[in-house]
Each structure stands twice: as structure tokens, then as C-alpha cells.
Amino acid sequence: MALYELVLPKMGESVAEATIIKWVKQPGDMIEIDESVLEIATDKVDSEVPSPVAGKLIKTFFKEDDIVQVGAVIATIETDASSQIMESKAEPVQDIQQPVIAEQLISTQPVQTATIAQPVRSDKADFSGASRFYSPLVKSMAAEEGISLAELNTIQGSGSEGRVTKQDITEYLKNRQSSGHVVAAAKPAMAPEPAITQQSRPSTVTSSAPVSSVSGGDEIIEMDRMRRLIADHMVMSKQTSPHVTSFVEADVTNLVAWRDRVKSSFEKREGEKITFTPIFIEAVAKAIKDLPMINISVSGTQIIKKRDINIGMAAALPSGNLIVPVIKNADQLNLFGLTKAVNDLASRARQAKLKPDETQGGTFTLTNVGTFGNVMGTPIINQPQAAILAVGAIKKKPAVIETEFGDVIAIRHMMFLSLSYDHRVVDGSLGGSFVRRVADYLEAWDVNREI
């Protein structure tokens, strides 16, 4: 018999850690090759970690909701296949019980007292009722410094999806000590409300949020992890950017006629359905090349003009949640390539098979509210981007058409486009011109185009 060390696999170039959602197998369970051992999550992508060997699960080194670094040993499996043994040269298996996160806390904290050698465990304070996600490191630091859950909820997070990081805690403690504010934040209803600073601005649900009354027939549904992340991200976006929305109506009669003509032959030839989404993405990519200052993000007082055009497409999941897979370098793909990319990402999103990197790096987002029969919407910006476009349902309407013989009324296929943009850096002139440019590309569609 030999012990195999199961490590958290690399899940993408931009992913350095993951959160353990659920252990599918427990110590003592038998595992087959490629059988799922645990479920993990990175940002909004959930995935499974399969076992490369067969054997018995002996020990797990992390609990559910722990954040684990890529490459860290997460479990040991007893196997009799000698070829599958992975020797541990550095240290015995039983010594790998202290999470990497705790080691980072020990090595980076200033050496002041004996608490460095024996860090206070996060279970000294109860954070089980937290409405936001906190890493074990953040919980440990909060417990050590006597920060209550109510006070922790008031700290503005600078990490991914608005998460509170070690640096946020450190900065908050400096401000708290200098202002003499130690425990008052734990009882906001009895103490004067502190001034909102960059470190103390509330995010999503705080202790001062209104409380809904519950009657006997009401059902209480706890938000799942993805919904909590979405909630945090939406509130953070509205707190960060002053939103403005511009609307245009586009005549897409030629576009509809073209798709009706080619969709059957295209599906027979390529085995793919051609929807309106890749057509919209192509128009957006062209408009961004014409007006590149819409393809930006903000860092403090700096405007970062993005070189790549990476367009995210908001997709609704069977669970009711939302995810935004990203088509990288969309301007470099033709319509056929965009169709393949859209269909592939949408299919794997519904099956929870997206890779973490496939939801990262977006510079602009498109959301198709017409899928739900809506004619228009006012979408919330997907931070740190500066704009998001919503396309509404295509409806037949009577419209005035200018001809050489005068104006006539005809039945046309019309749709609304609405662009929400960050008014700190995108003025009405640019925002309005951009959404109009997208509409112009759609209206000018060539009915004889081949694909």
C-alpha cells in the first residue's frame, strides 16, 4: 500500500486559488479512477476535482468553504498501484495540516508578540451567519483583532467580486486605531454612524440593511454561493459607477430576412445553429474598433484603454443565476468563428463545464434581454468594465420608410438597444454615439451575405 497526495489542479492562467464547496467523498470511501472527489469554485465557475488514481480516501486537509492555493495537497488516497505513488520529499503527509493561508499570515505579520507563533484560530468568533464570503485568513485576523461580524460587514473589499482581503483588514485596523473606533461598529444602532470611507463603505448586505418581516406562510430561501457573489458584484458596481443609459431603436428587417434564409442550410452544413447573438457581437466588436474609448476600465484617476476586445455574453443558467463567459479577441473572429464560440460557451455554461479563465478578462459585456421577451433593459455594468449593452426582443411594428416616391408606412422588424455606461469616464456623446454605431451596423446588414 502507498499514499497518493491529491493536489488542487491548475485551472487556468489567472486562477491561483479555489474555494472548496463540497467533499463528494469522505475519509474511508473507495474511489475509482476519474471519479469526483470534491467540488470547488473559482469566482462564479463551479467544477469537480476527479481522482487520477483508484483507492481509499484516507484524509482530507481542508474543510468546506476553505480557500486553497493551486498545487496544495488537499487529500491523501491509499492505493496499491506502485506506479501511482507520489513520494513527498519535502515533509511527511501528517505535517501538511496547516492551510497555506495560515502560513502566509504567520510569515507576513510583524513580529510583535507571541501570538505570531501561535495564531488565534478563527473559531473564537462566530462568523457562521455572515451574509458575505470571508476567507479563513480574514476570519482569523478578524477574530484576533476582536472584529465582530457586524463590524466586518462594513469593510469595503478590494478583492475579486468585492471580497475582503488581508490588506483591507490591515488598512481598516490602521484607520480604526487612529480614530479610536474599536467596538462601536459592532452596535451601529446605538452608536453614531461612522463616516463612510474607502475602507468602511458598506457592501451588499450590512448590519443597517432593512429587515423584512416574515409571516407564517412565507418561505425563507438561503442564497446559494453564486447568488451571493452576484449580489455583491451588483451592489459594488452601483456604488462604484454613476450609471447612465442611452437607447436607440434599430430596423433589423434585412438581418432577420437573412437569418431566415441561411439558418437551415447553415445548420445542415455545420451542425450548428446560428442565433442573433454572434451577429450582435460582431457589430459590437466593429463599433469598439471605431470608438475604442468605450473599451476601457478605471483605476483610481487613471483610464486604462484596453488593447484586446474581449466580449462577455451574459447567460442565464438553469438555476436562475447568471454567468458571463468571455469571447477573447472577438474582433479577430469571423461570423462563423463567433457562432462556434457562442454556441460552445453557452452549452458548457448550462452544463457547469466552463473553465475559470473563460469568465475572466472581459472588456465589454452584451446581454440579450430579448431572450425573455423584454423589449429593453437598463443593465448594470460588469465591473471593472465601463459599459454594457442590452439588446431587446425583435418585434414587428409599423414604421415610416423614406422612399424616392415619398414616405410610406410598412411592417418592419424593430428592436431597442440600450447601453449603460460609467459616466465618470464615458460622456453622453460617446455613449450615445457608440450604441448608435452598433445599430447602424445591424441596419446595414447585407441580405446577400454568405457564411
Image (spheres, rainbow, N blue to C red):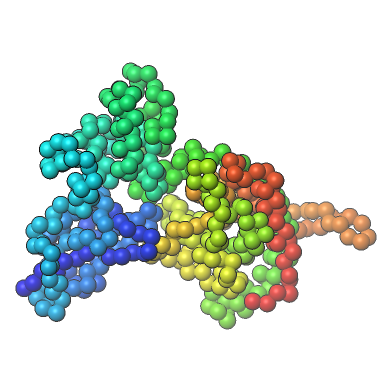
Residue drawn at (79%, 53%), measured in percent from left and top?
Answer: 399
Q: Residue at x 20, y 48 (%)?
A: 107
Q: Quadrant of residue 116?
A: top left
Q: Quick one: which residue is furthest to the left in this view?
A: 1
Residue at (59, 44) in percent of width and height = 425
Position of residue 109 in the picture relative to residue 118 (left or right): right
> Is residue 349 left or right of 400 when viewed as pictured?
left
Quarter holding the C terminus is bottom right
- Is residue 84 left or right of 130 when viewed as pictured? left
Q: Position of residue 345 (x, y in %)?
A: 47, 65
x, y (%) of residue 84? Answer: 15, 76
* x, y percent for residue 417: 65, 52
- Would you identify the image quadrant in which residue 446 lies? bottom right
Would residue 433 appear left or right of 8 to someone viewing this image? right
Q: Can the viewer see residue 3?
A: yes
Q: Residue furthest bottom?
A: 269
In this rendering, the answer to whether 345 lies above or below 292 is below
Q: Position of residue 79 (x, y in %)?
A: 11, 72
